[in-house]
Image (cartoon, rainbow, N blue to C red):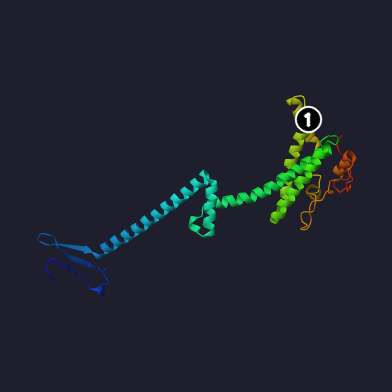
Amino acid sequence: MGAGADETQFIAPDLVDHEPVHFHMRLAVAFPDPPQRVVTISLWQLFLAGVIAYNAGIVATSVRDLASEASGDARERGLYTRDFWSWTQEQAGALRRRDSSAIDWNNLIEEVETWGRSERSAWSSYCANVISHLLKIHHSPKSPDLNHWRKEIEDWRTEMHVKLSENPGMKGELAEMLDSAWRRGRDIAVRKLAEHRSPENAAHERQLRRGYGSQLPAECPYALEDIAGYDPFDKDAKPGPDAWPAPVAQILNDALGTDYPVRYRASERGAGHSR
């Protein structure tokens, strides 16, 4: 080779002796001014340097990716909390494009679960209102609000039916939902019954609440069909005007002149009402 050219020399000991093989690269590197400098570098050192450089590249790429993802997540969280409507439009667009990289998975999952809980909560809320009104009719039969309560029950039954028709999968959770609605409805009835007695002061109202809290049954005395106004497990059934718990039907007939059928179920036989 001429002056200034790279020269490579490979030197190895006798391989038969099974000694470690050492390859060296003798590089004649041309510098601007003579003399040339000769640098001997182990190929093992070159290999290690290559591995380090390669891994450094991977780490740098990973860091860049993580930083990008973190930046995207922060951006999505910011939009989610700052402008929820715009967030929904952006996520809808990403879903339509099937662009999984643009989907804000954590917040989207949370929202989907929230939508399901809201449907269940809505049904339970309507049911609690029906139960509280049934209890008020049952335990305040002389109230001038009986007809108003009756009409509101019919409206809320319609809403219960709509929610369950739109979400038939909730039927498997009706027992748990009814239990929650009963507790809430009972609490509302205790409070409202005390208020309807026009308490003289706060102490009197607390006394009335304690009285109704002891008087009202601890367990729901009404069948689901008499609360909803129909059998929710019958896919063709709808709320009807004649579905009432027997004691409530009797009170409405006596007070309003209605002719609702008085059908006592086993759990209602012998149940009276407060005068």
Q: Is residue 41 above or below residue 171?
A: below
- Whether residue 113 sits left or right of residue 183 in the image: it is left
Residue 132: tell me if it is visible: yes
Which percent across, then down, holds residue 50?
Answer: 30, 62
Which percent across, then down, holds residue 149?
Answer: 80, 40
Figure quadrant of the N terminus: bottom left
As drawn, the residue found furthest toward the bottom would be: 16
Camera-side residue of 229 and 6: 229
Figure quadrant of the C terminus: top right
- The residue shown at (64%, 49%) is 117
Q: Is residue 89 above or below residue 44?
A: above
As drawn, the residue found furthest toward the left would be: 34
- The residue shown at (72%, 53%) is 164
Residue at numbered disc 1: 208
Q: Residues within 10 Å of mark 1 (few under 14, many from 20)?
A: many
Residue 217: tell me if it is visible: no
